[in-house]
Image (cartoon, helix red, strand yellow):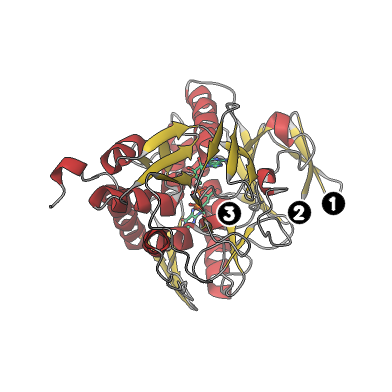
Amino acid sequence: MAAVDNSANPQRRLVLLGGGHAHVHVLQDLARQPIPDFAVTMITPFARQMYSGMVPGLVAGHYTADQASIALPPLAQAAGVTMLQDAAVGLDAGACDLQLQSGGRVSYDLLSIDTGAVMRRDEPPGADEHALFVRPIEHFVQGLDTLLTRESQGGEPLDIVVVGGGAAGVELAMALQHRMRQAAPRPGQNGSRVALLTGGEAPLAGYPAEVMQRAADTLKDQHIAVFLDTCIEVRVGHLMLGSGARLACDTAVLATGAQSPTWLQGSGLALDGRGFVQTGATLQSRSHANVFAVGDVSSRVDVQHPRSGVYAVRAGPPLVANLRLWVAGQSLKAHTPQQRTLNLISCGQRSAIVSWGNWSAQGRWAWWWKDHIDRAFIKRYSRAMPLSTQPA
Ligand SMILES: Cc1cc2nc3c(=O)[nH]c(=O)nc-3n(C[C@H](O)[C@H](O)[C@H](O)COP(=O)(O)OP(=O)(O)OC[C@H]3O[C@@H](n4cnc5c(N)ncnc54)[C@H](O)[C@@H]3O)c2cc1C
């Protein structure tokens, strides 16, 4: 895409929409070196960014919410970025105008979107009223906290069904089982049960066969019943399954796939068939050169990769580099996402499965490795450098 001379106009506006994994890096980078003559605003609904990789550990009781999240206001303050706790509900990319949930509007010269994916709340029927959705993660964490506090304070035993056989569903089922067992007066004696409903395929479908086997064996060892069936309705006390059976359930935790936000429809931005923002190698929108999009909300037209936190995190440095180049009117650089990622799947009991390509292993050491990587990530963004301490 051709470079535009954007360097002459003072005090233009860069809006960072969403406090996602790539944008925390942008904030930290701006704290080191502000963009001259640009007023930067971050718009995001929550004051902290939950680090999804640590959410299963939070559910298992290994971390507190503070240990598993990045506080955004200190990062924004250090970067000289104005933070608005709000959310986009509409976008007119042609007019460079964002509509916010509060009723306000914000216009921009340059927009960067890192708002993640969403889950449709009307699927399956009854879910909106009776289920806990894993996204937004902030709401999930609060909802689960209420539920587990009730359970640990001597409430009735719970039948929890985690719906979704991907990595998030498998990790959450094992984390919940661990948490319930720990909370019991004697391990395993409180009568609460966790089951996993996969949607039809075996748990971790799409992973190498050895990893799937490890997951199946571990779920069995932990007495987590696995149902290869779909949930077609959530009702009080049970789930209706595609096979016609009913599955007893006090709380359904929905860890089903990621969907695109509806507010992108009608924005004028080029979207893929599923409604995600189409971008190219420079992370720019295919239709609007002053809009960048990264992470789960985006869809690269030139390369395909899974929607995962790893890719969102890795997009941070090339994103901020290209925002700076755009501002300076210079040619942007292509970002090539890595082809494989290290997968660390936590198994609840401070144990994890690790996989790289077709190689895999499992053990407590893998959990400690994951723990080290995750804590280092949080630590990196918990030390924002204030503007006053920047080198001249
Ligand atoms: C339980 C669970 C465990 C997971 N574990 C892993 C893992 O171990 N490894 C891994 O790689 N991936 C994991 N994932 C996937 C990972 O969470 C996502 O791929 C990752 O969060 C995507 O990052 P992102 O920056 O695109 O978006 P997000 O992390 O979703 O961040 C989006 C940000 O935008 C804000 N926002 C949302 N809507 C709006 C709006 N309308 N306006 C303004 N701001 C908005 C949000 O509040 C948030 O701050 C897991 C997911 C779940 C649910």
**Furthest residue toward right:** 244
Q: Report x, y in % for residue 150.
A: 52, 22
Q: Secondary structure at mark 2?
A: loop
Asked if the residue at label 3 sits under 8 Å from ligand 1, the reply is: yes
The residue tagged 1 is: 243
Residue at point 83% right, 45% down? 245
- Nearer to the camera, 191 or 348: 348
Residue type at mark 1 is Ser
Q: Estimate how packed mark 3 is, as few (under 14), some (14 to 19) or many (20 or more) residues with alpha carbons within 10 Å.
A: many
Vertical placement of residue 19 versus 203, above or below:
above
Which labelled disc corresponds to residue 297? 3
Left or right of 158 on screen, residue 178: left
Q: Which residue is mark 2?
A: 229
Query: Residue 13: x and y, percent?
Result: 44, 45
Instruction: Measure the alpha-carbon separation of dots 3 and 2.
Output: 28 Å
Task: Answer whether labels 1 and 3 touch (C-beta < 8 Å).
Answer: no
